[in-house]
Every structure is written in structure tokens, then in C-alpha cells.
Image (cartoon, rainbow, N blue to C red):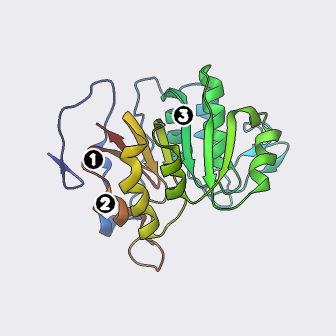
Amino acid sequence: MEENGKNAAHVDTSIIYHPDSYVRADELGTLIPRYQPTFRFGAHINDHHRFLSQAVNPQTGLLLLTAPGLMDHGSGAPIVGWLRLEDAQKLYELGFYCNGDILELGSYEGLSTCILAQAIADSGRTGLVTTVDLSYRQPVQDNALACGLSSRIVVALADASVAIRAFSPKRFEFIFVDHSHEYEHVKAVCLLLPYIAAPGAFVLFHDYNDPRNGKEPNYGVYQAVVENLPEQFRFCGVYGCTGLYRLE
């Protein structure tokens, strides 16, 4: 069976793959695959994971989280960002179960950053989220502080490709790629991932399932991944607008 034009090798029974969620280029954004677990657990990992499946902004249909708290819509200011509920649940799951530190490329105001840091904290293990952005973003620091997650987050100012080269030989077991929508920028990261991904590492690409890819200028996440991600990364599934791959 082929997934994304690549031969599927052996199946790791500890991980759940969802090849049927694959979205073709002509289907981008018209199909929104539901959230499904990659690791084996019940319907939800915990109360926070359940909350992320329901924390919808009725005006936008996207995720609504506030700082402080991350689970309380009654107080605090919304953390600005653009995540679907499916995206948020997958981020939390991978942050909860993947060992070691997490690398995030693209911070914006820290919505995904805080979800990842909260997942590490809830898992009871040690670990940090290193989030990389081209420019300093005070809201990341403010939201992390308001949510009590500052000690779990390290902010690095750098171009994504430059940062990856600087981190090597350090290896991450989970990498979230959301630094750019441009084909060349995503391509550059794809080609460098083998240098910082640990064996069995997961890489989650945001805006992978977006109808603008390949149609609008400066949008080519899907095409960059499909055409340039090295063969050793196996397709795991599409969840909301994210595409998940694993280094095997």
C-alpha cells in the first residue's frame, strides 16, 4: 500500500496510523479529517484533552483558549491564534506522550506553545518547549506567564533553518512546524529534519490541509512536504488542518 507516494514498510503496533485520512491536493480544505489518537488510550487522555475537544469559539469555529488557565473561558483574555479543535487535540496528545524536549517552529502569540507546555506538565515528566520565531513576541511570554508555564518554555529568535542547524546534534522527539506557509521555507525545514529528529520522532505540519496551498501566492505547505520530506518519514495521518509524519 502506498501513502503519499511512499511505500509503507512494517507497522509499529504501538502507534496507530490513519492512512485513510490522507488528503489529495484537489481535496485540500474540502475534507477536514476528524481527530483520531496516534497513541493507544481511551476517548481522552484526561480532562484537559477532553476540554480541547469542546473549547470552540462559536463565532469562528476555531479553538478558544484564555490566559490564565487554558481551561476557563470565564476569565482571562483569549490567546490569539488559529487552531482547529482537531489540531489542538493532536498537539496535546503528542506533547503528552512524546519524551524529551519539543521543538516548535513559529510562535505567534503562544497558543500552540502553551498547549504543548501544558501537555508536558500534565504528563508529569521533565521537558521544555523550545519555540523559534524570527521576531520577539511579547505575548508569548505574557501568555506563558499567565498560564504558569514560563518554566516550561524557551523562546529562541532565529530563522527556522538557522535554528535547526544550530540545534544539531540535539534530537527532538516531537517537532511542530508552523513558521511559514511558503513552499521554499517549508522545503528547507523538511530537508533538515533528519538532523534534529530522534528515531521514532513525530513531525506535525500546520496548514498542511489548507485550500490555499498551491493556489495562492506564498502558500505551499502541502506541496513542500509531499515533494521534499525525506523517504524515512512515514505518513501517519491528517487531523483537522495538520499533517503528521513519523521518522522510521
The numbered dot on residue 228 is 2
Q: Residue furthest top?
A: 124
Amino acid residing under circle 2? Asn
Residue identifier under label 3: 95
Earlier sequence position, callout 3 versus callout 2: 3
- SS of the residue under disc 2: helix
The quadrant where residue 38 appears: top left
Earlier sequence position, callout 1 versus callout 3: 1
Residue 216 drawn at (x, y percent): 45, 79
- Give the Cα distance between marks 1 and 2: 21 Å
Q: Is residue 175 left or right of residue 148?
A: left
Q: Are marks 1 and 2 in contact (CB under 8 Å)?
A: no
The numbered dot on residue 106 is none
Earlier sequence position, callout 1 versus callout 2: 1
Residue 206 drawn at (x, y percent): 49, 55
From the viewer's perspective, is residue 65 above or below residue 15? below
- SS of the residue under disc 1: helix
Q: What residue sits 28% from the left and 44% below the top?
A: 234
Q: What residue sits 52% from the left and 57% below the top?
A: 162
The numbered dot on residue 20 is 1
- The reply to whether residue 226 is in sight is yes
Residue 245 drawn at (x, y percent): 36, 45
From the viewer's perspective, is residue 198 above or below residue 133? above
- Give the Cα distance between marks 3 and 2: 25 Å
- SS of the residue under disc 3: helix
Which residue is more in the foreground, 71 or 216?
216
